[in-house]
Image (spheres, helix red, strand yellow):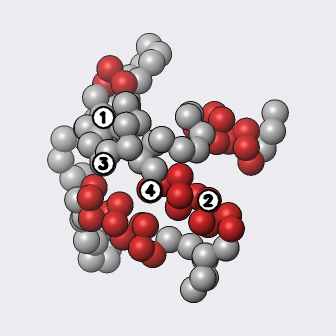
């Protein structure tokens, strides 16, 4: 899933080859190609989002960093870095 408009709504769409630049596009798997050795629960995007919002963090009480990151997540694209590169630079300046 990808959210290209960052409009503050949980309304992404499936990724397509046109989303990738370059001369060698990714290979998309059309069906499962292996069976995990342990049971796996597959969640919808909405259920996965709700679970992350409810359970993400390293301890019982979220610290300031976790609160900032969860705030960016729950803004659904309206807050936080506008690209993965900017997010990486926030942690590891060039």
**Which badge, 2 or 3, is on the more N-terminal residue?**
3
**Which badge, 4 or 2, is on the more N-terminal residue?**
2
Q: Quadrant of the C terminus?
A: top right
Label 1 or label 2, whichever lies nearer to me, is 2
Q: Which residue is mark 1?
A: 15
Q: How many marks?
A: 4
**Which badge, 3 or 4, is on the more N-terminal residue?**
3
Q: Which residue is mark 3?
A: 10
Label 4 or label 1, whichever lies nearer to me, is 4
Residue 32 at least partly seen: yes
| Secondary structure state at the residue bearing disc 4 | helix
* Disc marking residue 68: 2
Q: Say if mark 3 contacts mark 4, CB within 8 Å.
A: no
Res 16 → quadrant: top left
**Which residue is more in the foreground, 90 or 20?**
90
**Which badge, 4 or 1, is on the more N-terminal residue?**
1
Residue 35 at least partly seen: no
Quick one: label 4, few (<14), some, or many (20+) residues within 10 Å?
A: some
């Amino acid at each position: 899933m990808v959210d290209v408009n960052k409009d503050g709504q949980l309304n992404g769409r499936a990724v397509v080859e046109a989303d990738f630049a370059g001369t060698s596009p990714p290979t998309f798997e059309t069906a499962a190609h292996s069976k995990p050795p342990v049971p796996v629960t597959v969640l919808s995007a909405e259920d996965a989002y709700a679970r992350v919002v409810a359970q993400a963090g390293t301890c019982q009480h979220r610290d300031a960093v976790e609160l900032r990151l969860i705030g960016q997540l729950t803004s659904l694209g309206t807050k936080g870095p506008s690209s993965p590169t900017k997010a990486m630079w926030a942690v590891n300046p060039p």
